[in-house]
C-alpha cells in the first residue's frame, strides 16, 4: 500500500493525505463550508475521528482510499407490479435478457448491494405475466430464465410474503433453498391469520432468519440484518453507524476521489438522519461532476508544505 502523503491544501490546512485535500477542493468547488477533524468520539468499536464536518448539512464525512467494500448480491422475491414493495425501480433495464446475470447497484439504508432480481420485462408487465393475461406468453421464458440466474448468483435470498397467493415466490424460495443460499423470509401483518402463519410454515423452515411486522418494519429489519450479518460493513462503516446512533448528525463514508466515489454510487455509504437526504443527493449532478473533476485535476506540491498549484 502506498503511504499517505501529508499535504497542505485549501485554507492552509495540513491534511493527512492528498486524498483528503482533494475532497476539500471538491467541497470548495460546491460552495460547501467544511471543517477538518473537528471532533473525536469514543464509540463501542473504538475511537473515531471523522475527517470532515459540513456544518450546513450537519454531516460528518470519512474519506478512505481505494474502492469501497464489494457489494453483496441480493435477490428480493415478492410482490411484482404497480404495488411491488421494493423502494426502487425494478424495470428490466439492467442487462436485458442475455446469458449474463442481470444486476443493478442499489442504495438501501446507506449500504449498496447488487440487486439481481427479479426484474420486470423490458417492455412487458411482470404482474401481467403472473396473472396469465393473453399476449405475454413469449416473454415468460426469458424472465423465468433471468430470475433463475439471479437466484443462482445471489449471496442472500430475501422473500416477502404479503398474502397466501405468492405462488411464484414460493417456487423461487424452493430454488434458493436447493441452491444452498442464505435465506431471509419476511411475513407481513397483511397475511391472514397473523403470525405464525400455519399455511406458510414450510416456507419458514427454509429460512435462516424470519422477520415479521408491517412491510416497512420488515424492510428496515432486513436492512439492519444485511448490514451486520451480510458482511457488507467495513470497520469505518461500523463506526459511522455507531456515531449515527449516538449523535444528531448524519455520517457519510466515501472511498477514493470524488470522481470514482460517485461514478456508480458504490463508493459512497451514507448513514443519514431520517429528515435528511443522503449526501450525494444534495447537489445537482452536473455541479457535482464538475466539482469532482476539479478535485481530481488539482495539483499539489510534494511534501508537507505543498499547496494547491
Image (tube, grey):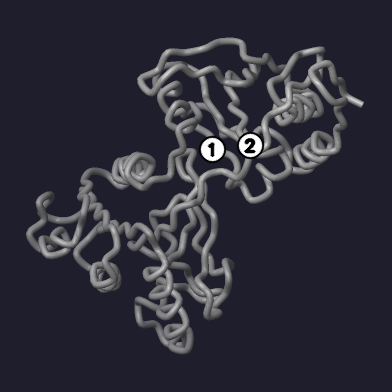
Q: How many labels, in total?
A: 2
Q: Are marks 1 and 2 in contact (CB under 8 Å)?
A: no
Vertical placement of residue 47 versus 293, above or below: above
Q: Could you tell which of marks 1 and 2 lies nearer the N-terminus?
A: 2
Q: At 36% from the left edge and 45% from the top edge, which residue is drawn?
A: 226
For the N terminus, the quadrant is: top right
Q: CA distance from mark 1 to mark 2?
A: 14 Å
Q: Which residue is mark 2?
A: 65
Q: At 57% from the left edge and 22% from the top edge, which residue is drawn?
A: 60
Report x, y in % for residue 94: 57, 66
- Pick the residue in front: 35 or 223: 35
Classify 10 Å Cα crowding around label 1: few (below 14), some (14-19), many (20 and above).
many
For the C terminus, the quadrant is: top right
Q: At 77% from the left edge and 38% from the top edge, which residue is drawn?
A: 292
- Extreme-left residue of the structure: 198
Query: In the rendering, which numbered label is found on residue 269?
Result: 1
- Extreme-top residue of the structure: 39
Left or right: residue 260 compared with residue 248: right
Q: Quadrant of residue 201?
A: bottom left
Amino acid at each position: 500500500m502506498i503511504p499517505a502523503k501529508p499535504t497542505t491544501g485549501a485554507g492552509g490546512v495540513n491534511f493527512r493525505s492528498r486524498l483528503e485535500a482533494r475532497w476539500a477542493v471538491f467541497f470548495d468547488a460546491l460552495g460547501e463550508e467544511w471543517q477538518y477533524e473537528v471532533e473525536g468520539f469514543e464509540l463501542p468499536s473504538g475511537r473515531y475521528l471523522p475527517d470532515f464536518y459540513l456544518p450546513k448539512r450537519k454531516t460528518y464525512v470519512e474519506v478512505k482510499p481505494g474502492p469501497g467494500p464489494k457489494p453483496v448480491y441480493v435477490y428480493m422475491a415478492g410482490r411484482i407490479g404497480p404495488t411491488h414493495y421494493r423502494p426502487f425501480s425494478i424495470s428490466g433495464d439492467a442487462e436485458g435478457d442475455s446469458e449474463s446475470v442481470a444486476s443493478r447497484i442499489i442504495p438501501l439504508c446507506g449500504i449498496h448491494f447488487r440487486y439481481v432480481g427479479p426484474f420486470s420485462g423490458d417492455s412487458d408487465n411482470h404482474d401481467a405475466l403472473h396473472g396469465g393475461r393473453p399476449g405475454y406468453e413469449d416473454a415468460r421464458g426469458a424472465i423465468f430464465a433471468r430470475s433463475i440466474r439471479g437466484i443462482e448468483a445471489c449471496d442472500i435470498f430475501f422473500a416477502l410474503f404479503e398474502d397466501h397467493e405468492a405462488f411464484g415466490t414460493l417456487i423461487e424460495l424452493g430454488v434458493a433453498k436447493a441452491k444452498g443460499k442464505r435465506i431471509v423470509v419476511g411475513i407481513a401483518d397483511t397475511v391472514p391469520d397473523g403470525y405464525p402463519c400455519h399455511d406458510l410454515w414450510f416456507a419458514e423452515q427454509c429460512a435462516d432468519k424470519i422477520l415479521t411486522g408491517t412491510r416497512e418494519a420488515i424492510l428496515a429489519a432486513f436492512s439492519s440484518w444485511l448490514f451486520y450479518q451480510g458482511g457488507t460493513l467495513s470497520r469505518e462503516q461500523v463506526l459511522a453507524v455507531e456515531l449515527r446512533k449516538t449523535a444528531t448528525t448524519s455520517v457519510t463514508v466515501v472511498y477514493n476521489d470524488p470522481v470514482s466515489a460517485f461514478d456508480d454510487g458504490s463508493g459512497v455509504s451514507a448513514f443519514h438522519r431520517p429528515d435528511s437526504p443522503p449526501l450525494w443527493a444534495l447537489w445537482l449532478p452536473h455541479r457535482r461532476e464538475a466539482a469532482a473533476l476539479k478535485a481530481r485535476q488539482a495539483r499539489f506540491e510534494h511534501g508537507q508544505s505543498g499547496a494547491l498549484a
